[in-house]
Amino acid sequence: MKRVVVDHFGGPEVLRVVQEDDPRPGPGEVRVRVLAAGVSFTDAQLRAGTYIAGGPKPPFTPGYELVGIVEELGAGCSRRRMGDRIGALTVWGADAETVCVPERDVVEVPEDLDPAEVVSLLFPYMTSYQALHRTARVQPGESVLVHGAAGRVGVAALECGAQVGLHLYGTCSGRDFATVEKLGAVPIDYRNEDFVARIRRLTGGK
């Protein structure tokens, strides 16, 4: 199988493709044939060695997320079956033809969805869910301000927030007002408005 390797930190020129034997899954792992792997700003940070949350030391394979098909089960696996289509957040390692991932970390992906479309959803919706429900622990009726509301993670946060009945506000540029409004949020032009003062007026200072 082929995989991408970063031998040393740097720009896109440090990426190279190597060919080697397929990996074998360890206990609790499944081997996945990758159908689509995401490319994001985080991948560029990992490659450059500037990811704020840390990351692997070279050599390593980048790739934060993937959608693929389970090809082999490691010892102790019981949730997934061979042939299942799954998605996973790997943080790194997804840019390869086959990858081994912990079975506990994969989610089922319906067969009728485009893998490339699904892989673009994994990271932003995971980030939004974690921020809203595990960090902020939001409750229906509360107010939330989303910065970059028209971006990938911003859109996901607004959609997730609408599902639980939040009052939503989003900073964006003027050209993105319609997009933010369609998602149920009050848009705020961060370039021309003091968003703190505007939020205080809109929420009565709460």
Image (cartoon, rainbow, N blue to C red):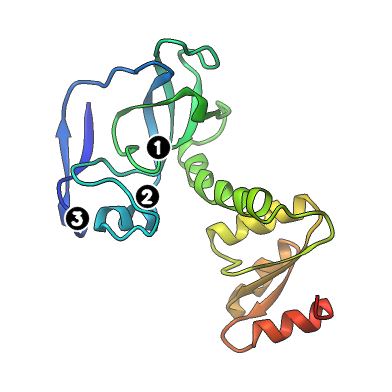
Tell me the amino acid under the disc marked 3. Answer: Phe
Question: Which x, y percent locates residue 75?
Answer: 41, 10
Residue on which the image places disc 2: 39
Residue drawn at point x = 52 percent, y = 16 percent = 80
Name the element at disc 2.
Answer: loop
Residue drawn at point x = 60 percent, y = 89 percent = 192
- Dot 2 or dot 3: first in sequence order is 3
| Quadrant in the picture for the N terminus | top left
Question: Which x, y percent locates residue 16?
Answer: 16, 44
Residue drawn at point x = 15 percent, y = 46 percent = 7
Q: Residues within 10 Å of mark 3 (few under 14, many from 20)?
A: some
Is 126 located above or below residue 52 in the figure? above
Name the element at disc 1.
Answer: strand
Residue on which the image places disc 1: 36
Name the element at disc 3.
Answer: loop
Q: Nearer the viewer, residue 55 or 123?
A: 55
**Left or right of residue 168, residue 39 in this image:** left
Q: Which mark is residue 82?
A: none
Question: Which x, y percent locates residue 149?
Answer: 61, 67
Q: Residues within 10 Å of mark 1 (few under 14, many from 20)?
A: many
Tell me the amino acid under the disc marked 1. Answer: Ala
